Amino acid sequence: MKKHLETRAMFAGYRPSDAQMAVKPPMHPASTFVFPDARTGAAHMETAYGVEGAETPPEGFIYSRLGNPTITMAEQRLAAWDDSEDAALFGSGMAAISTALLAWSDAERPVWFVGPLYGGTHHFLEEVLPTMGRSVTEIDHLDQLDPTLEDLGGQRPGIIYLETPANPTMQIQRIRTAAEWAAQHSTEDHRIVVMVDNTYLGPILQRPLEQGADLVLYSATKYLGGHSDLIAGGASGEADVVAKVKEFRTFLGGTIDSWTAWMLARSMETLHVRVEHQQRTAGHVLNHLRELCGAENVKSAWSNDLATMGQDVATAEAQQRGGGAMIGLHVPGGREGAFAFLDALEVFKLAVSLGSTESLAEHPASMTHAGVPAEVKARTGITESFVRLSIGLEHPEDLVNDLTHAWKVAESVATLAV
Ligand SMILES: Cc1ncc(COP(=O)(O)O)c(C=O)c1O
């Protein structure tokens, strides 16, 4: 009988018999690996470089930029959580995202993306990728796929890229719509690859591959790592989709290092426990915030809030296993009120990033999304009064008290300003 996900993920990528029956995997810091003989070395290297007529090498490692036993162990653990054929780990979420986008796009394979996206991804797509010979088109909504194809004279995309729920505004995209459209418009020599950034919920709460996505991307710095003590990224999916991403990783050089991979693998053992607890606490905090601040000022990927925001609740309920632990809040008094609110927090730490054991708060308009054009911020609701909260593992009452105090401070700042 196939074991449950949590059970499979616990030992994914490692058997105690691999390392003298140690219950936990060792960490391999080696940068390079000894070839048994020159012929095998040549087979490894010529295959890695795609040299015609190369001999197929035996299983084994060459050099840690291409992979090593610790990295493979952590990759297998991510693949287990996603139930994917393979996964690739990187030195950051941006390394994973930029490498995947470069791997599957070229002059004949434009990128279409549905905003809003994480600010760094948005910047890479709008400012960097076009300088590398890729055309990039933003579409407002997935119902615009057909009209976009017509506007672009029938040129199909190589990639459809989305993030759902979006950081930080919680817009929901129906992954299946993108996947079905991509399947209909793909041909043998032109596969349209649907990529989904699943950082905000992670594999416990949302499983994009089961909704038809081809590649799921992560800032593993967030829930997968989840302790604010490492920077990493991940890409997970079908073996041939990931293989191309790994090929580009070899030459762009964004591979994760062994120590970080080991830490990440360790963190992934508690992923479900952390995320489920954080989600429960977020539910408690949200109930309180809707009362205190007015439901119209609260944003989250929970059904109640999505309904207030006019978002597609049915889609969220179909593709998510809960609303997660991220909250957006419109604070009175514009930027001044938002800053007073953030400065008044004591339990929440004022820092960018999210998905960690400690609760964090930040001001997207001037911090994580500072580089997003003003027009895009206005269109997507990243206003001066908007703050983002990431719920950690502290006691819910302490979080509620902290937020209540900060809200009152912001209200008094807003009243003084009138
Ligand atoms: C949704 C999302 N995707 C990607 C990234 C980039 O990840 P990293 O900071 O690990 O490069 C972030 C970072 O905040 C993010 O929030």
Image (tube, rainbow, N blue to C red):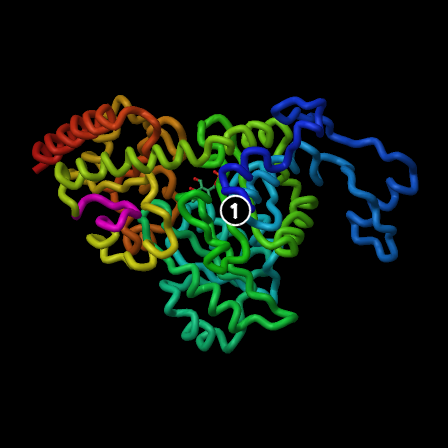
Rendering coords of residue 186 (x, y %) = 56, 70
One can see residue 85 in this view:
yes
Q: Say if residue 340 shows up in the picture.
A: no
Q: Nearer the viewer, residue 315 or 141?
A: 315
Up-down relation of residue 59 to residue 176 (above or below): above
Residue density around tag 1, few if under 14, some if 14–19, many if 20 or more, within 10 Å:
many
Instruction: Report whether 282 appears left or right of 252.
Output: left
Q: Is residue 288 left or right of residue 79?
A: left
Q: Quadrant of residue 23?
A: top right
**Circle 1 — which element?**
helix
Residue at 25% of width from left, 52% of height from top?
A: 306
Residue 45, x across and y down, in percent: 82, 44
- Using the image, determine if residue 187 lies above or below residue 369: below
Furthest-front residue in this view: 1
Residue 169 colored in magenta in the image = no
Q: Amino acid at mark 1?
A: Asp
Q: What span is in magenta? A: 296-305
Q: Quadrant of the C terminus?
A: top left
Residue 300: x and y in percent read 28, 45
User: Vertically, is 206 above or below 114?
Assistant: above
Residue wearing tag 1: 82
Residue 95 in the image: x percent, y percent? 56, 43
Q: Please state if 355 lies on the left or on the right of 108 as rendered.
A: left
Tell whether circle 1 marks a residue whose Cβ is less than 8 angstroms from ligand 1.
no
Query: Magenta span has 304?
Result: yes
